[in-house]
Image (cartoon, coloured by chain):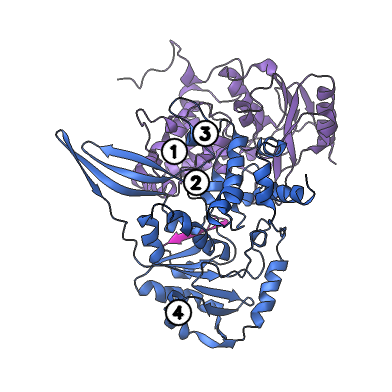
Chain colours: A blue, B purple
Amino acid sequence: MPYLKMDSADLPKVARKLAASGARLVLPVREGDERFYREGADPDSLDLTTIPKNSIKEFLFPKTEKILRYQYRGKDVTVEDVPPAAAGRTVIFGARPCDAASLPVVEPLWNWDYKDEFFNARRGATVVVTYACRTAPDEACFCVSVGLGPSSDQGSDVLLFPLDETVVAVRFVTAAGRELESAFAEFGKGEVAEEALEAFRKTGEASLAHRKKFDRVQGWLEAHFEDRLWEEKAFRCVGCGTCTFLCPTCHCFDIQDESCFDVGYRLKNWDACQFSLFTLHTSGHNPRDTQPKRYRQRIYHKYAIYPQKFGKILCTGCGRCVAHCPVNLSLYDVVATAQERAERGD
Amino acid sequence: MSDRTAGIRAIAGKWLQDGTVEAVLGWEQGTYRDKTAPVLVRKAEEVDRLVFNERCTNNLMTYLKRDPVRSLNTVGIVAKGCDIKALIGLIQESQVPREKVKILAVTCPGVRNADGKRPVKCAACDVNTPVFYDEIVGEKIASNPDRAARFRDVEALEAMTPEERHRFWREQFDKCIRCYACRQACPLCICSRCIAEKNQPQWIETSAHPRGNFAWNLIRAYHLAGRCIECEACETACPADIPLMLLNRYMAKVVEQSFGYEAGKDPQTQPPLRTFKLDDDNSFIL
């Protein structure tokens, strides 16, 4: 099927039309030297130059969310559900393929033994318009290592291919994506044959600095829980949790009750396995009592436990944990070391 | 290889060889862009991993509070003048015995952040040549501190109306995701259990809503009043790009005006909010 061709300069106009249709619009904008996905920003501030510092997860799984309300009346307490907040129909415009791909990765988790109505309500109302990477936006990118790529359509409803500085090819991937077709149609400037995208894909993949395939990592991890690697690599981890909070697939949360006089709410807040409190028992015992053990847990969850349970790596290779780690503890280096040791039978 | 890198390797090798220290904490070349990474060298034959360049931004004193460095009996630490200020704070507060740490000081012409810019602390630096150390490497550099640089942004904030200032901080704290990277990177956040982690009672709401975020960021600033040595580790680590140093420098300014004290200068003194003196200014008490 041929793809719609349009000028990249018209992308903000498409975004504006989508916002005018009443959708909650999320798009990457520039703040200081960084880009961030932000809700409700002016479509003209759309900035697709590089991968944003935050991921798109906060628009489906907010950093804090009320899940129930309680009220004391004398000796009685009434408890009522707080329905999933009405975020409404959401268009994430200009997501990177690694962010879009995080959605099908985490969906099984939110629908495992318990169906998380909060995530599902937002997921069902969200359409993702992805901006494929012509070349890797950062040297930390490693999407190819986890079986994705700069042109991956995983999790995308519409995929934009920036063929050069001025021209974009548009592919409507899903039925939800095709519903947006009318917003794009008037900016169409002809068609692009599907074959042209093959060259785009190859250039993109070839541009990645990190491309080692992580196909033997799970097996290696399963046999090396106790290994010198963890202390050696992770002594430098300061436990700041930046990696987990910027990660599109990390999804752990904490439950907190907060009340003011007689009324309170139960909240679901982002949490992180990198904190000592995360596993601290009431007795005072902490099974993950040092930072290297906590760092190891993060790698295991992503590359061994989650694949065992859901058949998918819990990582899309976005590279944020590599780029933004304040002590340059690179997940890519650690996992690539595991892969290399598996390859040489160490 | 620079003279400083060579000097660091020579002294670290000597210390490890003769058993002066069990390990040397320093920087090695990183794997992302021009970043450096903290490294713990335990054997003399590994000292070639150590480097010094203007991207050695991390304040390594933060490792003194956690294992494996905490449990060492003796450790050598490669340190710039600004990093040593943090160690002075830790010694003042009895967190680290002076004799545990051998300071391998390095003279520093200034570092650069990831964006290539010099941090404010370098413009205001008065310790390009460290004054508190066991060994020192590098050519001596005379400091020419622009002391006003420290408070330039604070003064712009003070010029705002209270409403404008509140709006400014409301917008900044809205970005906070409560990852506590600021606390973890800080060499002087020393509590083994932070007040943000105390939940009986819950002093500070952990939710990333405006009330919780104001409470957290202000408590953190208060706990560092008169203690923060302005190394900027918190602001560098913050994944949400909140200008945390504005808070820290404001507190530093107030402490300087009220008590004539600047943190990280003299291990023989005590931070003013840790001590009581009969002649302290009590005029603010009604």
Q: Secondary structure at mark 4?
A: helix
To the question of a shared chain for discs 3 and 2, the answer is no
How far is mark 3 from mark 1, CA to CA? 20 Å
Q: Earlier in the sequence, mark 1 or mark 2?
A: 1
Chain assignment, label 3: A
The quarter in which the N terminus of chain A is drawn is bottom right
Disc 4 designates what residue? A178
Q: Residue at x 36, y 40 (%)?
A: A256
Q: Residue at x 54, y 31 (%)?
A: A287
In-image side of A325 versus B280 (left or right): right
Chain assignment, label 2: B
Front one among A280 and A182: A280
Residue A196 is covered by the magenta coloring: no
How far is mark 1 from mark 2, CA to CA? 10 Å
Q: Residue at x 65, y 45 (%)?
A: A222
Vertical position of residue B18 compared to residue A198: above or below? above
To the question of a shared chain for discs 4 and 3, the answer is yes
Pinpoint residue B138: horizontal percent, then vertical percent.
Answer: 80, 32
Q: Secondary structure at mark 3?
A: helix
Disc 3 designates what residue? A276
Q: Secondary structure at mark 1?
A: helix
Residue A38 is covered by the magenta coloring: yes
Chain assignment, label 1: B
Disc 1 designates what residue? B217
Residue found at the far left of this picture: A74
Which of the labelled discs sits on residue B242, or is there none? Answer: 2
Vertical position of residue B187 compared to residue A206: above or below? above
What amino acid is labelled 4 in the image? Arg
Q: Are marks 1 and 2 in contact (CB under 8 Å)?
A: yes
Q: Pointer 3: residues within 10 angstroms few (<14), some, or many (20+)?
A: some
What amino acid is labelled 1 in the image? Asn
